[in-house]
Image: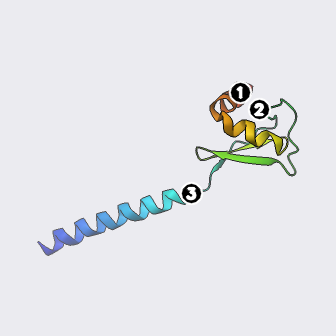
């Protein structure tokens, strides 16, 4: 009985640790080189970025952030079509 409890406890702790680390994962960089809002090239040395659904998207300027956040799915779809 004690061994069974120890195994169950170990499994629960393992699952809790996995969930904790999954929440701290770095967002995936999409590395798009064309701004989905304006269609302009992104200055890749210092891009303006926005995070959405665990991914980081590059934009050409700070003015595009608001447009992206207003309808992110529209712009994510544009990036997917560009690839």
**In the image, 21: left or right of 74?**
left
**In the image, 20: left or right of 6?**
right
Task: Describe the element under mark 3 as helix, strand or loop.
Answer: loop
Q: Which residue is mark 1?
A: 78
| Nearest to N terminus: mark 3 or mark 2 | 3
Residue 2, image x, y percentages: 15, 75
Q: Which residue is mark 2?
A: 36
Q: Residue at x 82, y 34 (%)?
A: 34
Q: CA distance from mark 3 to mark 2?
A: 25 Å
Q: Which mark is residue 25?
A: 3
Q: Residue furthest bottom?
A: 2
Instruction: Note whether 10 is above or below 34 in the view shown.
Output: below
Q: Residue at x 55, y 60 (%)?
A: 24
On the image, which quarter does residue 58 sit in? top right
- Residues tagged 1 and 2 counted as in contact (Cβ below 8 A): yes
Decide: few, some or many residues near mark 1? Use Cα within 10 Å; few <14, some 14-19, many ≥20. some
Task: Describe the element under mark 1 as helix, strand or loop.
Answer: helix
| Nearest to N terminus: mark 1 or mark 2 | 2
Q: Nearer the viewer, residue 77 or 22?
A: 77
């Amino acid at each position: 009985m004690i061994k069974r409890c120890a195994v169950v406890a170990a499994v629960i702790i393992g699952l809790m640790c996995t969930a904790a680390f999954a929440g701290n994962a770095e967002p995936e960089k999409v590395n798009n080189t064309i701004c989905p809002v304006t269609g302009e090239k992104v200055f890749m040395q210092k891009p303006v970025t926005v995070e959405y659904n665990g991914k980081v998207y590059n934009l050409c300027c700070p003015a595009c952030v608001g447009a992206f956040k207003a309808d992110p799915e529209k712009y994510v779809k544009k990036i997917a079509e560009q690839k």
